[in-house]
Image (tube, rainbow, N blue to C red):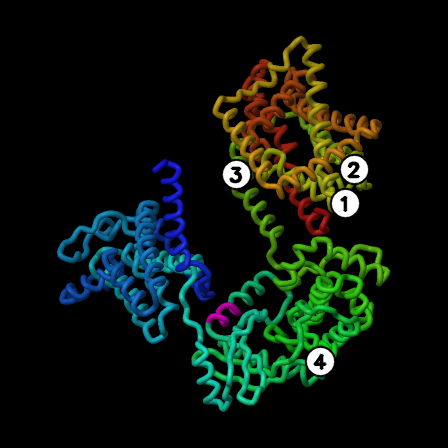
C-alpha cells in the first residue's frame, strides 16, 4: 500500500466518523431559555470573580455563613462526603447514564463533553484567580477527617462540574425531575462548605461558571427537546370537541410559534399556531432586545405567560376584524399540555411574497386594508410580504397579529407603512408600490413616513431580502421624494437607543479618560518650569497651532470635486484630531475624514482618492523642502531619518504581503472588489493631474501646514529665551514627525516627545530647557485642543456630517 492510498483511506475513515458525530450535533433545537441562563450566569460569574480577587472580603460576609455551615453536627460527615461525590469527575458516568436513560445518546455525549470541559476550565480559572482555600485563609476551621484539600479555591470545581451537567439536562428533562436536579446542585455546594473545602463565594462562582459553560454548549450544539406529538395535539382537541382527520406541521413563515394545518372530519380546514415555553422565552428575548435597542417605543414589555401572548394576538385579530379588515376568523384557544394553540379558519390565499402575478388593484387593496387597520387605532408591526395574503378574487388579507399593538403611537403606524413600502417593493418593484400607496396614503402622511425608511425599522425577513437589492432602498426614497416634490434631504428618524456609533463614542471617551489623559502625569514634574516663559510668545504659539486646522481643511476644500465649506471642514479637522488621539497611525483621522467627504457628496472612491492625494501632497511638501533645506545646510537626510528595520520585522512584512496576495488570488469575490476599488481610485487620482493649478494650491497649503507647526515650535524656543533659530526648529519638528510615523501611538505620545528632546539635546540645549519647550509645544498642539476637538466631534456626529 502506497503512502497516498493510505492517506486516502485514513481520510475516508475520518470523514465517516465525523459524519456519524455530526448527526448528533447538527440541526438540533437551540432552546432560547439558555440565552437567559447564559446572561445571568455570566453576570454572577463576573461579580463573584471580582469579589474573589478582593482578598479581605471573606471576613465581612462569607465568614459567618461559612462558619454556620462548617460547624454543623459531625454526624452529617458521611452523608455530606457521599453528596460531594456527585460533583466529582468520577460522577461523570452517573450523569451520562441519566442523560442516556431519560433522553437519548446524543444528550449523554453532550453531558460527557460538557462535564470534562467544565472541570478543566475550573482548574484553569483557579490558577488565574489564585484565591486560597479556607484552610489557608482562616486560623481555625473544621476539616473532614483533617483532610488537606490543597490548591486554590475559586471557583469550586465540584460546583462547576455538577452545575454544568445539570444545566445541559435541565430543559431536556421532564418538569417533574427538574427540582431534583436543582437539589443536587445545591447539595453539592453545601457539602463543599460543610467539609471545609470552599468558601460560599467559591461555590457561587462554581455554579455560575458551570451554568455558563453548560448554556454555551447547548446554544452552540443544540439540545434534544421533545416537541408536542400529533397524537397529543389530537387528544387535546378531542377533549374540546374538535375531531380532526389530519394534522400536519405547516411549512410556512410563522415567527415565534409552531404552525399546523388541521383538517376536520367533514373537511373543514383550519390553521393553528402553538405557543409554548420555548416560544415564550424567545418572545422575552426579542422584546428585551427591542427595549434596549429602540427608544420612544411602547408595548415592548414581555408577557408573564405564553397564554397572555395568545390572548393578545386574539384580541388584536378580533379588533381588526371588528374594524372591517379582512383577517382570519378565530375558532378557539386550546391548551395542549403546557402550550397554547390558537385555531383559525384557513383562508385560501397566497402570500404576497410568493404570489405569481399580482394585479395593481390587489396592491391598492392591500394598502386599503392597512389604512383601515390604522384608522381603527392599531398597528400591525410586522407587515412583511409573508403576512399579506392575496385570495383568488385578488382581495388582500392581513394575517399574523402576534406583534400587533392596539392604541399605538403614530410612530408605530409610520413604521408599518415604511415596512410595507419596502417589502412590497422587493416583490413588485418601486414604481408599482408607490403608485398603489399614493392612491391610499395622503401626501402629508407619506412625508412623515419618509424618515422611517431605514433598515433598522424593517423586519428581519425584509432586511435580509434587501441585502441582495442594495440600491432599492435609495431608489424607493428617491421615487417618493420625486412624487411629493421634496428637494431637501430629510433626516432619518432617531429611534435607535444603542447603535454602533454610540457604542464607539463611549469607547472613545473611555480611552480618552483612562488612557490618554493619565499620560499627562508624565509632564506634571516639568510644568513648574513654565513659570519662567515669556507670556508674550503665547499669542503666536496658540495662533499657529489653530491655523494648522484651517490649512488642513483648505487642502480638502481644494481637492474635493464637491464644494466644501471651509468652516465646516475646519471643524471636521478638529474632530479628526480627536480621533487621531484615540486611534494611532493616522487611521482614526483618515476614517473620520473619509466619512465626512462621503457625507458631503463624494463617492467612496473619490473620498479615498482625496485622502490619498492629501497624504501624498503632505508627505511631498514635508520631505522635499526638508531635503532641500538639509542640502543647503550641508547635512544628510539620514541624520534626521533613522529607521532601523530588523530582519524579523522584514520577514513578517513579507509573509503578510504573501498571505494578502494569496487571499486575493483564491477569493474571486474579494479580488473583484479590490480590482474595482483600485480602478475607481486610479481614475479619481488621474482626475487630479488634470487640474495642475488646484494641485499647486493644495501643495502650497500643505507646505504652509508644516510651516505653521514649525512656527509654533520656534515660538516655544523664544518663549524660554533659547538661542535656537528657525533652521533648528525645522530639524526638531522633522525628527518629531518621523518618530511619530515610525512608532504609531495615540497622538504620537512618547516617541514624539523623546525624539524632540533628543534632537534639542543634540543641538546643545540643556535637558531642563528642552523638556520645558516640549511641554509647552505639546500643550499647545495636543492637550489644549482635546476639549475643543471632542466638542467638534460631538457636533459633527449630531449634525450627521460624519
The CA span between labels 3 and 4 is: 59 Å
Residue 438 coordinates in the image, percent (x, y): 81, 69
Q: Quadrant of the N terminus?
A: top left
Span colored in magenta: 278-284
Residue 560, which numbered label? 2
Whether pointer 2 and pointer 1 mark residues with C-beta atoms closer than 8 Å, the reply is: yes
The CA span between labels 2 and 1 is: 10 Å
User: Can you tell which quarter of the image residue 724 is in?
Assistant: top right
Residue 376, which numbered label? 4
Residue 600, which numbered label? 1
- Bin the neighbour count of mark 2 within 10 Å (Cα to Cα): few under 14, some 14-19, many 20 and up: many
Residue sitting nearer the eye, 697 or 350: 350
Up the image or down, 516 lies above or below 336; here it is above
Q: Earlier in the sequence, mark 2 or mark 3?
A: 3
The CA span between labels 3 and 1 is: 36 Å
Residue 329 coordinates in the image, percent (x, y): 63, 84
Amino acid at each position: 500500500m502506497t503512502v497516498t492510498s493510505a492517506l486516502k483511506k485514513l481520510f475516508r475513515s475520518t470523514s465517516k466518523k465525523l459524519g456519524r458525530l455530526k448527526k448528533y450535533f447538527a440541526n438540533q433545537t437551540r432552546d432560547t431559555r439558555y440565552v437567559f441562563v447564559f446572561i445571568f450566569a455570566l453576570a454572577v460569574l463576573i461579580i463573584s470573580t471580582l469579589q474573589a480577587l478582593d482578598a479581605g472580603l471573606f471576613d465581612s460576609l462569607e465568614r459567618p455563613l461559612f462558619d454556620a455551615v462548617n460547624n454543623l453536627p459531625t454526624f452529617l460527615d458521611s452523608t455530606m462526603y457521599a453528596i460531594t461525590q456527585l460533583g466529582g469527575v468520577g460522577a461523570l458516568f452517573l450523569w451520562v447514564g441519566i442523560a442516556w436513560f431519560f433522553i437519548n445518546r446524543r444528550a449523554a455525549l453532550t453531558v460527557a463533553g460538557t462535564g470534562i470541559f467544565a472541570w478543566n476550565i475550573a482548574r484553569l480559572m483557579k490558577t488565574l484567580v489564585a484565591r486560597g482555600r479556607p484552610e489557608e485563609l482562616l486560623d481555625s476551621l473544621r476539616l473532614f477527617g483533617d483532610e488537606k484539600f490543597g490548591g486554590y479555591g475559586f471557583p469550586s470545581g465540584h460546583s462547576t462540574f455538577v452545575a454544568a451537567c445539570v444545566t445541559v439536562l435541565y430543559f431536556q428533562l421532564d418538569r417533574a425531575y427538574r427540582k431534583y436536579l436543582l437539589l443536587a446542585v445545591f447539595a453539592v455546594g453545601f457539602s463543599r462548605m460543610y467539609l471545609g473545602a470552599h468558601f460560599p463565594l467559591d461555590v457561587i462562582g462554581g455554579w455560575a461558571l458551570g451554568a455558563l459553560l453548560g448554556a454555551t454548549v447547548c446554544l452552540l450544539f443544540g439540545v434534544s427537546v421533545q416537541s408536542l406529538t400529533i397524537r397529543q395535539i389530537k387528544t387535546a382537541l378531542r377533549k374540546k370537541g374538535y375531531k380532526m382527520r389530519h394534522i400536519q406541521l405547516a411549512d410556512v413563515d410563522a415567527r415565534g410559534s409552531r404552525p399546523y394545518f388541521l383538517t376536520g372530519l367533514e373537511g373543514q380546514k383550519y390553521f393553528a399556531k402553538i405557543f409554548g415555553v420555548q416560544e415564550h422565552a424567545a418572545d422575552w428575548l426579542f422584546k428585551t432586545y427591542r427595549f434596549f435597542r429602540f427608544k420612544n417605543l411602547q408595548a415592548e414589555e414581555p408577557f408573564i405567560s405564553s397564554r397572555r401572548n395568545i390572548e393578545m394576538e386574539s384580541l388584536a385579530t378580533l379588533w381588526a376584524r371588528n374594524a372591517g379588515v379582512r383577517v382570519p376568523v378565530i375558532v378557539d384557544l386550546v391548551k395542549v399540555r403546557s402550550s397554547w394553540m390558537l385555531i383559525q379558519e384557513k383562508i385560501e390565499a397566497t402570500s404576497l411574497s410568493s404570489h405569481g402575478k399580482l394585479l395593481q388593484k390587489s396592491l391598492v387593496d392591500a394598502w386599503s386594508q392597512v389604512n383601515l387597520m390604522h384608522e381603527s387605532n392599531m398597528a400591525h408591526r410586522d407587515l412583511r410580504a409573508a403576512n399579506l395574503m392575496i385570495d383568488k378574487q385578488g382581495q388582500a388579507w392581513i394575517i399574523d397579529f402576534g406583534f400587533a399593538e392596539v392604541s399605538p403611537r403614530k410612530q408605530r403606524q409610520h413604521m408599518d407603512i415604511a415596512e410595507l413600502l419596502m417589502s412590497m417593493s422587493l416583490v413588485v418593484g418601486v414604481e408599482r408600490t408607490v403608485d398603489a400607496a399614493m392612491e391610499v396614503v395622503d401626501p402629508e402622511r407619506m412625508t412623515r413616513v419618509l424618515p422611517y425608511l431605514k433598515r433598522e425599522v424593517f423586519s428581519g425577513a425584509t432586511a435580509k431580502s434587501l441585502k441582495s437589492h442594495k440600491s432599492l432602498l435609495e431608489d424607493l426614497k428617491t421615487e417618493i421624494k420625486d412624487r411629493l416634490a421634496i428637494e431637501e434631504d430629510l433626516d432619518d428618524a432617531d429611534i435607535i437607543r444603542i447603535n454602533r456609533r454610540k457604542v464607539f463614542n463611549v469607547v472613545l471617551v473611555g480611552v480618552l479618560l483612562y488612557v490618554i489623559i493619565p499620560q499627562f502625569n508624565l509632564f506634571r514634574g516639568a510644568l513648574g518650569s513654565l513659570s519662567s516663559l515669556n507670556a508674550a510668545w503665547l499669542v503666536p504659539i496658540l495662533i499657529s497651532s489653530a491655523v494648522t486646522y484651517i490649512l488642513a481643511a483648505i487642502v480638502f476644500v481644494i481637492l474635493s470635486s464637491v464644494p466644501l465649506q471651509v468652516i465646516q471642514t475646519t471643524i471636521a479637522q478638529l474632530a479628526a484630531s480627536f480621533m487621531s488621539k484615540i486611534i494611532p497611525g493616522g487611521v482614526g483621522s483618515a476614517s473620520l475624514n473619509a466619512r465626512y467627504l462621503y457625507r458631503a457628496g463624494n463617492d467612496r472612491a473619490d473620498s479615498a482618492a482625496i485622502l490619498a492625494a492629501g497624504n501624498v501632497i503632505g508627505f511631498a511638501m514635508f520631505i522635499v523642502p526638508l531635503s532641500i533645506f538639509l542640502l543647503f545646510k550641508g547635512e544628510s537626510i539620514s541624520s534626521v531619518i533613522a529607521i532601523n528595520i530588523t530582519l524579523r520585522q522584514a520577514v513578517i512584512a513579507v509573509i503578510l504581503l504573501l498571505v494578502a496576495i494569496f487571499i486575493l488570488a483564491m477569493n474571486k469575490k474579494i479580488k473583484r472588489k479590490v480590482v474595482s476599488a483600485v480602478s475607481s481610485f486610479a481614475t479619481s487620482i488621474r482626475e487630479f493631474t488634470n487640474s495642475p493649478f488646484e494641485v499647486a494650491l493644495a501643495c502650497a497649503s500643505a507646505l504652509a501646514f508644516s510651516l505653521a507647526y514649525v512656527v509654533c515650535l520656534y515660538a516655544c524656543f523664544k518663549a524660554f529665551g533659547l538661542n535656537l533659530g528657525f533652521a533648528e526648529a525645522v530639524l526638531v519638528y522633522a525628527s518629531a514627525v518621523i518618530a511619530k510615523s515610525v512608532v504609531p501611538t495615540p497622538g504620537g505620545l512618547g516617541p514624539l516627545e523623546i525624539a524632540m528632546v533628543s534632537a534639542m539635546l543634540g543641538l546643545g540645549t540643556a535637558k531642563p530647557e528642552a523638556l520645558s519647550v516640549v511641554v509647552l509645544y505639546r500643550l499647545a498642539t495636543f492637550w489644549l485642543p482635546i476639549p475643543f476637538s471632542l466638542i467638534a466631534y460631538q457636533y459633527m456626529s449630531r449634525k450627521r456630517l460624519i
